[in-house]
């Protein structure tokens, strides 16, 4: 049964001054809210390791934010902003970043009505030589709803990842209401980011420093990674009054065989760093079900967890995915998920969540409510009343599942 949930029940007043416009000077100096046994307290993020259960398995999302925002100019002088969302041709991230002359992306195009199918040149007001030598151009292939398919072409034989590094800017969240600055190049990226593909940072990870990671290992907490590329849909509020009418975006992810085996063997708590890690990990159960029932893994659809009762154990499900990978000589599973986690969701993997504070009426706030058994208001009232900083560059919390 698809839950009937009214999004207005997940609203709260977020004053602009509570939104952190810039990161703190030190990553781990942010405040830490602790929700455990239905009680709320606070500490400092640098002390997070001491709050975590020993012998746990802690899982991070090692996706890397790409400088996916590009500014072009028509011959008439009109400015067109293009925000790359996901690959179209080639379809795979690794392949598209390796292309050396042209590629196609699904994009959000600002000022698209003023683009009359002419070829755009990159806006280069300072006549930067390196940018000029790239010769980056953009052509509008087609419009698809609120997005567009754009073909990029360039002259100097560089990989598209190099083109973006030179020509693009980091797409910081729109609610910061400012342009990308030098500080964002380093701080809107986790220390452990490895694989390019996200247009938004998995911001729960922005607080981690080498010291914190070392202290975590000292508590005999194992660490592993997943890679889910965060899409621009993470910024989108739920606009329909009923959550059942909201459409989730697909996000591609990769998990390794070694992680799956660790999850199966783990006797301690599973700690997810960020909602993206939660969505990846909780999707694994339903992928296992498709392996059991259909013999192959499929993407997880938005309402799969609510469509029927599932009798398989987590162990059976994970074992089925592991068997599929081994039978097919694969070291990793590469799929996508549209899973939406709302109150009533049955968590099968994650016990503890490290996360920031999220926007009102967002799918992320619905996930938090599901995780803490409806206690989100208690948590957010405390944060608002105790000078916590909100959203991407804001403070952190560690939540123990109710």
Image (tube, helix red, strand yellow):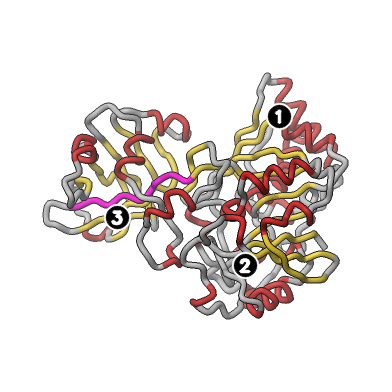
Which residue bears the numbered disc 1?
257
Magenta-tinted stretch:
65-73
Which residue bears the numbered disc 2?
243
Q: Residue at x 19, y 45 (%)?
A: 121
Q: CB under 8 Å between callouts 1 and 3?
A: no
Q: Residue at x 18, y 50 (%)?
A: 126
- Vertical placement of residue 356 versus 161, above or below: below
Numbered disc 2: secondary structure: helix
Report whether residue 222 is seen: yes
Q: CA distance from mark 1 to mark 3?
A: 40 Å
N-term mark: 1 or 3: 3
Residue 41, horizontal then vertical, whole percent: 76, 70
Residue 57, horizontal then vertical, whole percent: 77, 42
N-term mark: 2 or 3: 3
The label nearer to you, 2 versus 3, is 3
Q: Residue at x 47, y 35 (%)?
A: 93
Of 276 and 29, nearer the camera is 29
Q: CA distance from mark 2 to mark 3?
A: 31 Å
Residue 229, horizontal then vertical, whole percent: 54, 44
Report whether residue 244 is seen: no
Which residue bears the numbered disc 3?
81
């Amino acid at each position: 049964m698809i839950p009937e949930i009214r999004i207005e029940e997940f609203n709260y007043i977020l004053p602009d001054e509570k939104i952190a416009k810039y990161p703190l000077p030190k990553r781990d100096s942010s405040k830490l809210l602790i929700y455990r046994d239905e009680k709320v307290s606070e500490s400092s993020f640098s002390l997070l390791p001491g709050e975590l259960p020993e012998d746990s398995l802690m899982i991070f999302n090692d996706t890397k934010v790409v400088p996916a925002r590009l500014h072009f100019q028509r011959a008439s002088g009109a400015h067109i902003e293009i925000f790359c969302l996901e690959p179209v041709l080639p379809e795979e991230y690794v392949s598209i970043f390796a292309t050396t002359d042209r590629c196609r992306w699904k994009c959000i195009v600002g000022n698209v009505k003023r683009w009359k199918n002419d070829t755009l040149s990159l806006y280069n007001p300072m006549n930067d030589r390196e940018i000029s030598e790239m010769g980056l151009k953009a052509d509008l292939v087609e419009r698809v709803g609120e997005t567009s398919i754009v073909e990029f072409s360039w002259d100097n034989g560089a990989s598209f990842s190099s083109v973006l590094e030179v020509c693009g800017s980091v797409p910081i969240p729109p609610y910061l209401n400012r342009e990308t600055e030098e500080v964002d190049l380093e701080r809107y990226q986790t220390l452990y980011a490895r694989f390019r593909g996200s247009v938004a940072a998995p911001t729960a990870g922005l607080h981690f420093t080498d010291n914190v990671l070392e202290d975590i290992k000292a508590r005999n907490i194992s660490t592993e990674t997943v890679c889910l590329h965060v899409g621009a849909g993470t910024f989108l509020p739920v606009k329909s009054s009923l959550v059942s009418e909201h459409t989730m975006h697909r996000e591609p992810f990769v998990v390794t065989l070694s992680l799956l085996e660790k999850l199966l063997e783990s006797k301690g708590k599973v700690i997810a760093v960020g909602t993206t890690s939660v969505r990846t990990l909780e999707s694994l159960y339903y992928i296992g079900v498709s392996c059991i029932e259909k013999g192959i893994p499929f993407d997880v659809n938005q309402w799969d967890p609510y469509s029927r009762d599932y009798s398989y154990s987590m162990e059976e499900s994970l074992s089925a995915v592991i068997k599929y990978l081994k039978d097919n000589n694969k070291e990793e599973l590469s799929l996508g998920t549209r899973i939406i986690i709302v109150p009533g969701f049955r968590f099968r993997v994650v016990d503890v969540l490290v996360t920031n504070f999220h926007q009102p009426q967002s799918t992320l706030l619905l996930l938090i409510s599901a995780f803490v058994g409806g206690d989100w208001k208690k948590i957010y009232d405390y944060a608002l009343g105790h000078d916590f900083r909100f959203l991407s560059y804001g403070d952190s919390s560690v939540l123990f599942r109710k």
